[in-house]
Amino acid sequence: MTVLDTDFLGAATPADEIDPTADLGTARTQRRLTALYAARDVFVAHGYHGASMEEISTRAGMSKPVLYTHYASKLDLYLAVLQVYLDRMVDGIRDALAVTASHEQKVRRAVLAYFDFVDEDAGGHTLVFESAVPSEPCVRWRVRNAMGECAVLVSAELRAAGMDGIRAYACAFGLVGASHSAARHWLDAGRPIPKSEAVDVAVALCWNGLSGTTKR
């Protein structure tokens, strides 16, 4: 988690409204956060290739030279925005599993975390799973690494349930992949059924498979 992590649900302070009496560290952090908000909006609206640093700087209320003092390139800024969403996704899984509950309840919470991730900010979901720059190695690596972190968290629970390490990791990747695919389909289909029902379907698929290989 970085100091710039944010829920991206509100609005950052425009650059020209930042308190000039704030200490330099706080003011710089606020300007970087303002740029992230602006970049998020522009990347979601126009995609990576359609976005321009000029539009981002205008939306952030700062000049392009100032923007470049915070982020060296458009890709650098895109990666910063992307990482915030990836951190949120991983933290959602971590929080879902950090409870005292049955294994089946933890599976439900993990699946629900993916549905919440795609449901609560479709723009962030698009940046993570439908990146316009998937051929960029650093983008692929960050997404793959975040999905791997989620699988590691799930596999730890499966090992605790009695599954050996190799099978636990393989099953964890299966659960992670099935969960985010089901959540994406539900969103892309226009939320045809209530989220709770869609989660029930995904949980039934995952749990019916896992329950036969773990100790309940």
Image (cartoon, grey):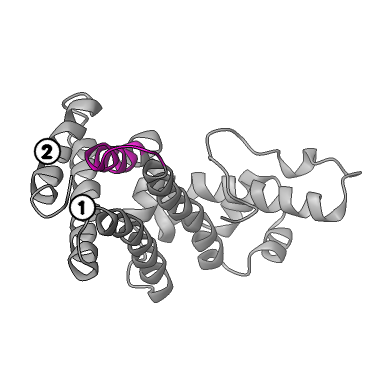
Q: Is residue 152 above or below residue 18?
A: below
Tag 1: Cα neighbours inside 10 Å, few (<14), some, or many (≥20)? many
92 is within the stretch colored magenta: no
Q: Residue at x 70, y 38 (%)?
A: 13
Camera-side residue of 97 and 131: 97
Amino acid type of the residue tagged 1 in the rendering: Leu
The residue tagged 1 is 175
The residue tagged 2 is 204
Task: Decide if residue 105 is in sight here.
Answer: yes
Question: Where the C terminus falls, by quadrant?
Answer: top left
Q: In which quarter of the image is residue 21?
A: top right
Q: Magenta stretch?
A: 99-116
Camera-side residue of 10 and 210: 210
48 left or right of 2? left
Q: Is residue 188 above or below residue 172?
A: above
Amino acid type of the residue tagged 2 in the rendering: Ala
Disc 1, SS: helix
